[in-house]
Image (tube, rainbow, N blue to C red):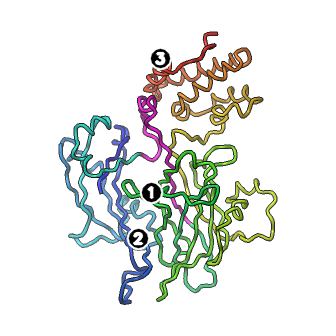
């Protein structure tokens, strides 16, 4: 596996950075299972974790022109329920939480520090890029969103990062706790499963279904596993995620039994996307005989507490009943140059849909965060000049104030490097015929 991590600023390199390797075992539920022959069902099971501090190794790699090898010990977790924070426990040296391996046992990685812009690095190190390397972007945006990328429009990104946080499930009459596997799909408005929209890691082939790892005998599993969903922009509206929960039996027949599900749309009715936050979703009861063919049967139900108010007429004789004692949490973070979570910015870009609100929409632009404005700078400027051409007398002053606000924003040292975007816009894209007024 070979990856280049990009967007790391000098500020990032001064932070406490770590390389963390989670090792997941594929196979039987228990390692000491004595049954003969291969298991017909393979589970993803937590196995071990290795950690390397970048601060510790930077001095030894910063001057080198080639890769340097490091051997990382793979520690095993003493209590599987604490697997989600094993890397933090290793970093904090909470040695009662994990077990060290025998000395000759570990993971070898090689590191090399590359300085410069991506194109320059590709030219200087062609050998690295000839071996199937995967370029790994930051979750979220870099400190410096490169303006020239915005100008030529080649830095288009639409990645939703999803973390499977935790669940709380009932025992369901069993004497021992369940072994719970979560299966996730991305589905479009018509119920079609979106193909190849789930990425388990940079360089991994995309897939259409995700299976979580399974914690042994835990009704309150915590996963902390991050997945990337590179969903096409035109498929975002109307798509939803469905999470199915199954109990995995360790008995001879080794079945997986469906007992519940949760879901969430990716976009709200107002056109904004799922907010960067933790979302606690409702769990609905179902069983192995349940069919999700008619997805409209559950999409009309509330997916979470906030959604409940928007579903006033929920029929009582539902095919799916909510399990009030169970819950499931995910967190999401969107890294998109085309979709926004800001209602005011979205209203401005789609102003023609709200002709009677244009004055209010223009007034609210000053409340949008600087990050969102520079990300959508060209789209915002285009929109302002179109509004101006639509009615100079009515909107002229507000458009003028909005432009002054944006120009002022670019004087801030944080966004200073975006001034070339504005200069290029003025020279090449600006076409506001009535702007001189």
- Where, by quadrant of the figure, is residue 362 drawn? top right
Residue 259 relative to residue 126: left or right: right
Residue 427 is marked as 3
The first of marks 1 and 3 along the sequence is 1
Q: Which mark is residue 273?
A: none
Image quadrant holding the N terminus, namely: bottom left
Which of the labelled discs sits on residue 199, or is there none? 1
Looking at the image, tell me whether mark 2 or mark 1 is earlier in sequence order. Answer: 2
Residues in magenta, as a range: 138-166
Q: Is mark 1 on a helix, strand or loop?
A: loop
* Residue under the point 53% across and 68% down: 182
Q: Does the magenta stretch include residue 152?
A: yes
Q: Which residue is identified by label 2?
A: 46
What's the distance in space between the residues labelled 2 and 1, CA to CA? 19 Å
Q: What is the C-alpha distance between the residues marked 1 and 3?
A: 40 Å
Callout 2 crowding tier (Cα within 10 Å): few <14, some 14–19, many ≥20: many
Q: Closer to the N terminus: mark 2 or mark 3?
A: 2
Q: Nearer the viewer, residue 320 or 143?
A: 320
Q: Do the residues labelled 2 and 3 touch (CB within 8 Å)?
A: no
- In the rendered image, residue 285, in percent from the top left (x then y), is placed at 67, 73
């Amino acid at each position: 596996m070979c990856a280049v991590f990009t967007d790391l600023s000098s500020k990032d390199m001064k932070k406490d950075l770590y390389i963390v390797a989670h090792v997941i075992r594929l196979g039987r539920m228990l390692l000491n299972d004595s049954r003969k022959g291969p298991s017909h069902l393979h589970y993803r099971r937590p196995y071990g974790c290795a950690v390397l501090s970048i601060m510790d190794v930077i001095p030894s790699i910063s001057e080198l022109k080639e890769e340097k090898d490091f051997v990382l010990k793979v520690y095993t977790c003493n209590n599987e329920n604490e697997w989600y924070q094993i890397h933090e426990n290793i970093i904090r040296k909470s040695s009662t939480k994990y077990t060290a391996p025998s000395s000759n046992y570990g993971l070898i990685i090689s590191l090399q520090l590359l300085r410069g812009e991506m194109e320059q690095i590709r030219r200087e190190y062609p050998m690295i890029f000839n071996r199937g390397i995967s370029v790994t972007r930051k979750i979220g945006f870099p400190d410096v969103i490169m303006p020239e990328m915005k100008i030529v429009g080649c830095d288009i990104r639409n990645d939703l990062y999803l973390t499977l946080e935790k669940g709380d499930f009932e025992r369901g009459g069993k004497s021992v706790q369940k072994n719970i596997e979560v299966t996730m799909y991305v589905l479009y408005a018509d119920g079609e499963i979106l193909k190849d929209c789930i990425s388990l890691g940079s360089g991994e082939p995309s897939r259409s279904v995700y299976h979580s790892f399974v914690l042994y005998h835990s009704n309150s599993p915590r996963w902390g596993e991050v997945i990337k969903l590179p969903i096409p922009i035109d498929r975002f509206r109307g798509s939803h995620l469905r999470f199915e929960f199954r109990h995995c039996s360790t008995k001879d027949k080794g079945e997986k039994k469906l007992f519940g599900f949760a879901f969430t749309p990716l976009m709200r009715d107002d056109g904004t996307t799922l907010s960067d936050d933790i979302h606690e979703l409702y769990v609905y009861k179902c069983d192995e005989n349940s069919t999700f063919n008619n997805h409209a049967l559950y999409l009309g139900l509330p997916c979470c507490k906030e959604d409940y108010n928007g579903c006033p007429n929920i029929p009582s004789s539902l095919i799916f009943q909510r399990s009030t004692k169970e819950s499931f949490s995910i967190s999401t973070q969107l890294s998109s140059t085309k979709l926004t979570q800001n209602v005011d910015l979205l209203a401005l870009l789609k102003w023609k849909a709200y002709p009677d609100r244009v004055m209010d929409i223009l007034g609210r632009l000053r409340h949008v965060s600087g990050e969102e404005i520079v990300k959508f700078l060209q789209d915002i400027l285009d929109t302002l000049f179109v509004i101006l051409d639509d009615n100079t007398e009515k909107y002229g002053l507000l458009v003028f104030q909005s432009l002054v606000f944006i120009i002022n924003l670019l004087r801030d040292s944080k966004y200073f490097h975006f001034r070339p975007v504005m200069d290029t816009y003025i020279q090449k894209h600006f076409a506001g015929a009535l702007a001189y007024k």
